[in-house]
């Protein structure tokens, strides 16, 4: 016979609130990583596609921004794919200046952070729509965070290539794991 575990209701409520905070912290981490990567490249490199049919860092940043603006505008009350979003244009091959990219990036991340600050644990199972399909808030946030991390990884890879060896490590430097492990400064707080 299996032994049942006692669950304390207060601990469950606390954990749900912690889940929202966990999402907020992970999004913030990826925002910083993306910004550090983009800062390391020249204005020309920001718009450089490595070959035909590839995306530049500016294109990826526009896409992340467009996605976040669409998803988190009226997140709880309207479909996350807004009729005003022109997703295909986010991938148009055109030059954007750094200021324009930074403004779009900042606006979209600020919206995300503002919306997350309004959520409590009680929202995690609430349903939201994305392209007409229902997702729980928890599922939608998981999906969104995975999407953002995927594209921020692309930004980092492109920045490393486009700096042509003049790269400042954002995370643990290559060959630096042992030294880092002595004082792990980038880890999540306990």
Image (cartoon, grey):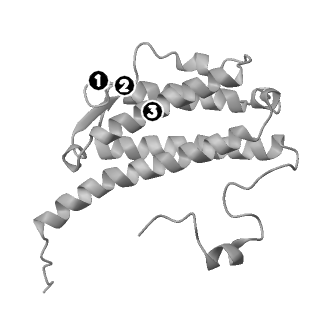
* 3D distance between C-alphas at marks 1 and 3: 19 Å
Classify 10 Å Cα crowding around label 2: few (below 14), some (14-19), many (20 and above).
some
Q: Which residue lies furthest to the top in this view?
A: 84
Which one is in front in this view, the residue at disc 2 or the one at disc 1? 2
Q: Which residue is drawn at 83% across and 30% down?
A: 51
x and y, in percent, of residue 138 in the image:
31, 46
Per the model, the C-alpha gap separating discs 2 and 1 is 8 Å
Q: State left or right for residue 102 relative to residue 148.
A: right
For disc 1, the marked residue is: 78
SS state under label 3: helix
The answer to whether any part of residue 112 appears in the image is yes
Instruction: Check if mark 2's residue and mark 1's residue have beta carbons within 8 Å.
Output: yes
Viewer-side residue, 82 vs 73: 73
Q: Which residue is labeled 3 in the image? A: 110
Query: In this orientation, which residue lies closer to the viewer: 135 or 114?
Result: 114
Mark 3 crowd level (few <14, some 14–19, many ≥20, 10 Å Cα): some
Q: Indicate whether 102 appears above or below 187.
A: above
Which residue is at 13% across, 64% downward? 10
* Residue 161 in which image quadrant: top right
The residue to which callout 2 is attached is 73
Q: Distance between the residues labelled 3 and 2?
A: 11 Å
Position of residue 126 in the picture relative to residue 108 (left or right): left
> Quadrant where the C terminus lies?
bottom left
Q: Is residue 62 something one can see in this rendering?
A: no
Q: Where is residue 1 in the image (x, y as percent from the top left)?
A: 12, 87
């Amino acid at each position: 016979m299996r032994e049942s575990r006692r669950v304390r209701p207060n601990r469950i409520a606390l954990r749900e609130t912690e889940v929202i905070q966990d999402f907020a912290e992970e999004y913030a981490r990826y925002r910083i990583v993306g910004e550090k990567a983009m800062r390391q490249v020249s204005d020309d490199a920001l718009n450089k596609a490595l070959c035909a049919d590839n995306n530049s860092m500016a294109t990826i940043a526009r896409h992340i921004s467009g996605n976040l603006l669409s998803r988190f505008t009226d997140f709880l009350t309207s479909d996350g794919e807004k009729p005003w979003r022109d997703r295909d244009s986010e991938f148009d091959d055109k030059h954007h200046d750094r200021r324009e990219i930074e403004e779009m990036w900042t606006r979209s991340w600020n919206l995300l952070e503002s919306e997350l600050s309004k959520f409590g644990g009680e929202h995690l199972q609430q349903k939201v729509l994305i392209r007409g399909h229902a997702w729980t808030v928890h599922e939608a946030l998981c999906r969104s965070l995975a999407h953002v991390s995927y594209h921020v990884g692309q930004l980092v890879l492109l920045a490393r290539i486009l700096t042509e060896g003049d790269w400042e490590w954002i995370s643990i430097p290559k060959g630096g794991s042992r030294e880092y492990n002595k004082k792990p400064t980038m880890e999540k707080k306990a």
